[in-house]
Image: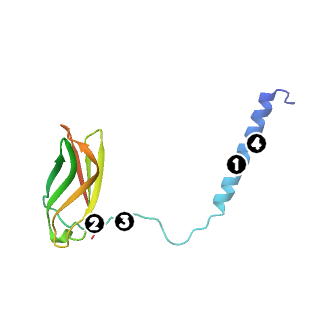
Amino acid sequence: MALHRPAARLALVALAAASVAFAASVAFAASLTFDGRSLGMDNETIPRCTATGLGVVQNVSGTNVVSVTVSSLPSGCGSATLQVTVNNQVTSSGGSAAVPAGGGSVTVTLAAAVAITAVEQIDLVLTGP
């Protein structure tokens, strides 16, 4: 059976190319080596420096939040980095500061002022020490 139509020839070339690609992928997979180790999953408990409530106060200039003061940080959080993000659903800004060695309070200045709105979200993240 002779193929005279260009579409039929194109289909035949595409089929041949797909067959070569499939054969190459099988050959590649067959060349992979495995050792005695296995893949798995682990569950780790991350220690917290505090599980108590923290005081959070927005510091404003006009109608904008320019920084956030976080208080009641225990000494177990000393030398950690406090990251704060303020989001008013239109603008989001954040900043970070080191927690004093003995705990206490720390003020984090935002990279950009965030307008005060009826709905705001403040996220706090402590990393370290």
- Identity of the residue drawn at 25% across and 44% down: 114
**Residue position for label 3:** 42
Disc number lying in front (2 or 1): 2
Select label 3 or label 2 by which is in front: 2
Query: What kind of element bears circle 1?
Result: helix
Q: What's the distance in space between the residues labelled 1 and 3, CA to CA?
A: 37 Å
As drawn, 90 above or below 51: above
Q: Which residue is mark 2?
A: 46
Mark 4 Cα-neighbour bin, 10 Å: few <14, some 14–19, many ≥20: few
Amino acid at dot 1: Ala
Q: Nearer the viewer, residue 26 or 99?
A: 99
Q: Nearer the viewer, residue 57 or 3?
A: 57
Q: Residue at x 77, y 28 (%)?
A: 7
Give how far apart the Cα atoms at labels 3 and 2 are.
12 Å
Secondary structure under badge 2? Answer: loop
Does 20 appear above or below 108? above
Q: CA distance from mark 4 to mark 3?
A: 45 Å
**Which residue ends up furthest to the right in the rendered image?**
2
